[in-house]
Amino acid sequence: MDQNVNGLESVSSRSGVLRASSRRSPRRTELPVLEVGVVRERSDAARNRLRVLAAAERLFGTRGVGGVTMDDIAAEAGVGKGTLYRRFGDKGGLAMALLDERERELQQHILSGEPPVGPGAAPADRLTAFVRSYLELVAAQLDLVLLSETSTTGARFRTGAHAFWRQHCRHLLSEAGAADPEIGTDVLLAGLSAEQIKHWLHDEERELNDLAAALSSAALALTMT
């Protein structure tokens, strides 16, 4: 189990199961546990999963997310449609699986990386560093994140990754003295949703660096009492 100096524990994949520890203390913020509940795959199932993910990444990259169907992915991967649907459910589930590794990298940086994203910096500095890092992560794979967050109503609220980001931001806002860390966290993460970021970057044609600076300022404003 990973733990940083602020008491944040471990990480969860986007599609992972959230399991909180029963231990509590005023200075402790606990996060989902890495690899909890993961069932070991048979070798053939693991090969099929990797083939499907590779096929989906190729097709999404060449045609765009909207131009690819689950049938296309099954054919490209050489697996049955039933296998594909049982394993991933829909394109949203596939998007979540593709995003998993990149999200884990940011989560590990938060837990044990260099400051200001990792432990060792002031809470306000870590909060603005998180905003910039997460914004860059979403912008780099915007259509996939958007699909994973909107495939069903409220999809983004039900993922282990969202639970991780939410607990991390709530912890930092609380440490920074925010008047209402719960509401502040939800406001901040709403601004970092893929749908909102796509609107700012594509519809309003904002520059990524300018948007990062504006969102970082908004995050700092949430720490003021």
Image (cartoon, rainbow, N blue to C red):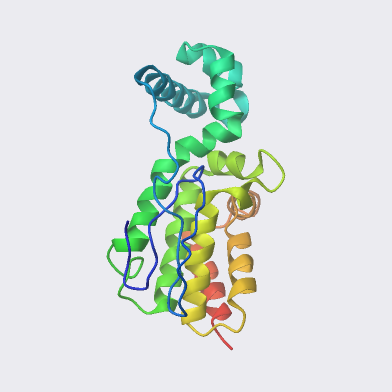
Position of residue 61 measured from the top left corner of the image (x, y, whole percent):
47, 29
In the picture, measured across the screen, residue 56 lies left or right of residue 43, that is right
37 vs 76: above or below: below
- 100, 116: nearer the viewer: 100
Nearest the viewer among 196 and 130 is 130
| Residue placed furthest toward the left | 114
Side of 74 where 2 appears, left or right: left
Say which residue appears at 54% left-offset and 81% top-offset: 223
Q: Looking at the picture, does residue 225 appear above or below residue 121?
A: below
Question: Considering the image in quadrants, where does the C terminus appear?
Answer: bottom right
Q: Residue furthest bottom?
A: 225
Residue 45 in sight = yes
> Image quadrant for the N terminus?
bottom left
In the foreground, 88 or 206: 88
**Residue 161 picture location, percent across and down:** 50, 51
Image check: 109 left or right of 52? left
Provide residue 199's location: percent of width, then percent of height.
65, 52
- Compared to residue 200, the image places residue 170 above or below, namely below
* Percent coordinates x, y for residue 48 in the rendering: 42, 19
Q: Quadrant of residue 40?
A: top left
* Residue lying furthest right: 153
Give the number of callouts: 0
* Residue 207 appears anywhere in the view: no
